[in-house]
Image: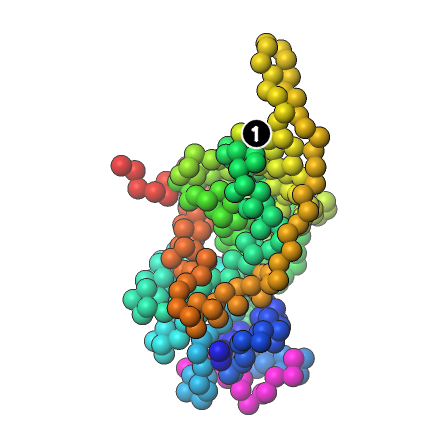
Amino acid sequence: MQVIQVGIGGMGNTWLQAVRKSDAVEFAGFVEIDADIARRQAQAHGLDASRIFRTLPEALEAVAADAVINVTPPQVHREICETAFAAGLPVLTEKPLAGSLTDARALAAAAAESGLLCSVAQNYRYRPLSQTVKKLLDSGELGAVGAAQVAFYKGPHFGGFREEMAQPLLIDMAIHHFDMLRFFLDSDAASVSAQSWNPPWSWFGGDASAAAQIRFVNGARASYVGSWCSQAFETSWNADWRFDCAHGVMRVKDDRVYVQRLLRAGGERGSANEHEDWREVPLMSMDRAGQDYLLQEFYEAVTRGGSTGTNAQDNLKTMDLVFGAVAACELGKPVSLIPLD
Ligand SMILES: NC(=O)c1ccc[n+]([C@@H]2O[C@H](COP(=O)([O-])OP(=O)(O)OC[C@H]3O[C@@H](n4cnc5c(N)ncnc54)[C@H](O)[C@@H]3O)[C@@H](O)[C@H]2O)c1
């Protein structure tokens, strides 16, 4: 499969490497709007400079391709994807699906109308940690999840578009954790309340910290707290987690998974629950993880027919939750995400 990668700076590096590693996908060309970045990346990655174009229409005119990989900032995702669909090409696009919910809905509708696959890079689902957590929850060993707690603290200095967004944490980062919640709980969000703020020392223009309470359709609850301007004791990018389940608890700390099961519930008044000793659960191994997994999944769906786990239609539900949280911050009250009967 021949692909055009649009956006080769920043996260573009990861996709350049993923395609290089793949034995099924190769580059037809590249698009990069910034000439300096194009020059630097051509040198750094040994790219054929004659195949780097300034716009997607120019690239589509000059090279034959089967698909587009979109690694541009969120506000241009819709334009890039719709240009690809108009040329009859499916797209593997970086998250967030688009810069606004309106654009995301229009983009998903355009994909559906064209009959072309639009797959979204929610790569956090496809990591050994997430796959291990999901397998354990699905095994039923701990019973139903009543509540999940997510804590995320990082202090990255990205520069660029994130430092200008009004809601950088919720839209560009919590989107991964919210998508993981949907994946782990096998349910969509029914309502969300949230608050966001920007600590005095923050180097972000918009709100780099947020907290949210989410109610899922299956009855599970989630509490989320996150910050992108934490000054110490940072968590992993995957965040720290706690799942309170009917028969025990799973904890995820520093990308390690721990389980403790209930042995006997205290029955008599004043008698305590008895627990098994806690144990650490080894992480599953994966042949391909993250972007490598997504690329192979996309290739198989495009060449054999079918779809991907994180296609635009599925991803709209993650976008609804993210933008529901943003709306809840603005309104100062809970936002319902499913129509009430
Ligand atoms: N899935 C993940 O884990 C993950 C991690 C980082 C970033 N991302 C996502 O990847 C996307 C890009 O983020 P980034 O950090 O690489 O940003 P970036 O600004 O570092 O890089 C974007 C690149 O796209 C180029 N570009 C911008 N507009 C363009 C256009 N119209 N045509 C062609 N090129 C254009 C820019 O010049 C730049 O080189 C964002 O949507 C971001 O949320 C995802």
Task: Identify the residue shown where x is 62% and y is 73%.
Answer: 21
User: Is the residue indicated by label 1 positioned so its CB lies within 8 Å of ligand 1?
Assistant: no
**Left or right, residue 106 beside residue 292:** left
- Give the quadrant of residue 273: top right
Relative to 150, residue 47 above or below: below
Task: Identify the residue shown where x is 49% and y is 42%.
Answer: 185
Relative to 55, residue 280 above or below: above
Inspect this view and state whether residue 1 appears.
yes
Give the structural element (helix, strand or loop) at label 1. Answer: loop
Residue at mark 1: 247
Residue 66 place in picture, x, y as percent: 44, 78
**Left or right, residue 134 beside residue 117:** right
Residue that extends furthest to the top in the rendered view of this protein? 269
Residue 181 place in picture, x, y as percent: 51, 45
Relative to 159, residue 125 above or below: above
Residue that extends furthest to the left in the rendered view of this protein? 341
**Label 1 neighbour load within 10 Å: few <14, some 14-19, many 20+:** some
Q: Amino acid at mark 1?
A: His
How many callouts does the rendering have?
A: 1
Relative to 110, residue 327 above or below: above
- Give the quadrant of residue 103: bottom left
Q: Give the camera-side residue of 171 and 321.
A: 321
Q: Is residue 36 magenta?
A: no
Q: Give the camera-side residue of 110 and 283.
A: 283
**Left or right, residue 225 beside residue 84:** right
Residue 200 place in picture, x, y as percent: 63, 46
Q: Quadrant of the C terminus?
A: top left
**Left or right, residue 31 beside residue 81:** right
Within the displayed image, which quadrant is ligand 1 positioned in?
A: bottom right
Task: Identify the residue shown where x is 62% and y is 11%.
Answer: 270
Q: Range of the magenta residues? A: 45-58
